[in-house]
Image (spheres, coloured by chain):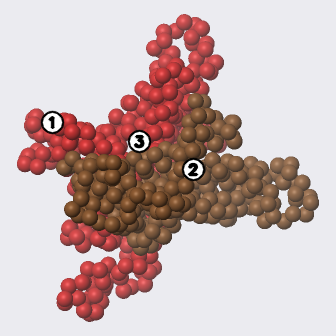
Chain colours: A red, B brown
Amino acid sequence: MRQSIPAFAARRLLAILPVLAGAVVFVFVVMRLLPADPAAFLVTGPQGGPEQIAALRARLGLDRSIPEQLARYVRDVLSGDLGRSLTTGEPVLADLLQRLPASLELTIAAFAVALAAGIALGTAAAFRPGSAVDHACRFIATAGNSLPGFVVGLCLIYVFYVRLGWSPEPVGRLDGLMVPPPAVTGFLLADSLLAGDGAAFRSALGHLVLPAATMALFALAPLARITRAALIEVLASDYVRTARALQLPTRLVVVHYALHNAAVPIVTTLGLIFSYMLGANVLVEKVFAWPGIGSYALEAVLSADYAPIQGYVLLVALSFAAVNLLVDILYGLLDPRARIRP
Amino acid sequence: MTRPLGIAALLAIGLLILLALIGPAIVPHDPLATRVASGLQPPSAVHWFGTDQLGRDIFSRVVVATRLDLAIAASAVCLSLVTGAAIGAACGYFGGVLDRWAGRVVDMLMAFPLFVVAMALVVALGNSVANIVYATAIINLPFYIRFARAEVAVRRDAGYVQAARLGGAGPWRIVFGTLLPNLAPSLAVQMSLNLGWAILNAAGLSFIGLGVRPPAAEWGVLTAEGAPFLISGQWWVAVFPGLALMGAVFAFNLAGDALRDLLDPRRRTT
């Protein structure tokens, strides 16, 4: 029986709920394994006696039993309370939401570039196996897997900022002295356009190019590889041969028959690539001093601040699940066979 | 195309292992000796890769770092190979409750971006080199578990397994004595590809300040130390360790691809 798209989506949505619940418990357990006591870590001043530590532990709820802490934690997470960052003093949820657009803008830009370039490269390679383009594709695919994002980022900074002076100083999302446009969406590119602020748009775009290119470079590799493999298989199929024998226009054969069918394996790797990018975010945001959630989590990691790390990992797991859900739905749209219930 | 590249990659790996073994004995300068007066010198005949802000010879530091980087990656991969293959093979052979629960844990682990899991684990376990090894091993586990599980499940009732059963071999002997040796070639490919990835992961963790701490020499730490000087034009401090890291990962990935072509014709890349 073939399901409708909404029914299929709903079933996929239900399937990720246990994973998310598991993620919450996993995060909690991992964080409670911490040997370093954040209360002792924080009260290091001259007045930090044992009773201050005990008071802080009581305030943080660390003196209760583990199951009780877990129950309280789950209740808090469900009500949107992710705790308070001990370094910024703000609620973690507010901090994360404030920084999320910066990370999303970067990830989406990189994803779009990688998608366009990877599919173009893979397609070009698939049509002429053994050609120079094909060798270039193979080389980029292997090199892209081997490139540490932070080294690539540093090299790009050196070439395009220090040597050529083409790109702005690699710190943050705008020039230091520039007044950011009023925040509507949080995406600087969109906000500056909405405000009609051309200078801010150019500055934001300039700051985005290098980090986005860094991330795109290594998301591109698996995409080009998969596109090439999938297309070669599809192009050798009977239906493409038939379409060609019928002298259908090349564009129709390539776009409608070949790419449409090759899209299925490509789409299934998108989730994996997005997961890579979320991890790479941390490194790229550090290199470019990008004020996103990755650098926020990093600061928390280095100052042993529980709550922001928990919040970050949960947010990342949530966005990862959301992307996988989207991929599943897209898959169901592209390939009706996926919606057949056994 | 793959053959010469694969041989080049194997030679590069041989060189890396050699450097890891005898590196500290052959470097031209003491990697920890500081001479501030000759700090931040560009590459020259005396200092091939230049010097850092404390006058330490970067070439010597990059060479000495090979041992630590390879040791972290190799122990992490061995750890996850042994545990992952054993768990996966047991799941594939016995199925049932064990298989269901292991599957769930693996799914849950895969619900996170793996670098983020590694980060959280190092924070939770404590910031040390040993914990980088454990974290890298844990995030590698799912791949080995899934792989061994799938391969064992396929072969569970193969002719030679039934023959072993008929010969009176117990389930453990079948799994470890008969089935796992048959997976060895594919596991070797997986391991080679994984080593490159493990090096990247460990260097990435060190780059953000987890695990290996300065003044110990490790490619990720060296790159991080050099990053501030890049802006003022002293590129050599960060770039050479970065290139060493890149080269090592590249070599392991190429060798893995070549090994796969050799051992597993079904999955040839061409």
Q: Which mark is residue A106?
A: none
Where's residue A302, x and y in %?
Answer: 31, 68
Q: Secondary structure at mark 3?
A: helix
Q: Which mark is residue A218?
A: 3
Q: Please, which chain is the residue tagged with disc 1 on?
A: A
Q: Secondary structure at mark 1?
A: helix
Where's residue B154, x and y in %?
Answer: 74, 48
Where's residue A149, x and y in %?
Answer: 37, 47
Alpha-carbon span between mark 2 and mark 3: 27 Å
x 28%, y 92%: residue? A50
Q: Please, which chain is the residue tagged with disc 3 on?
A: A
* Residue A259 visible, this orientation: no
Alpha-carbon span between mark 1 and mark 3: 25 Å
Of the pair A12 and B93, the residue shown nearer to us: B93
Alpha-carbon span between mark 2 and mark 1: 49 Å
Q: Are marks 2 and 3 on the same chain?
A: no
Q: Which residue is mark 2?
A: B14
Q: Quadrant of the C terminus of chain A?
A: top right
x 36%, y 86%: residue? A63
For this view, does B101 lie left or right of residue A162?
right
Tell me where residue B163 sits by quadrant: bottom right
x 80%, y 57%: residue? B178
Q: Earlier in the sequence, mark 1 or mark 3?
A: 1
Where's residue B97, x and y in %?
Answer: 68, 65
For the residue carrying disc 1, how many other residues have a C-alpha within 10 Å: few (<14), some (14-19), or many (20+)? Answer: some
x 10%, y 34%: residue? A198
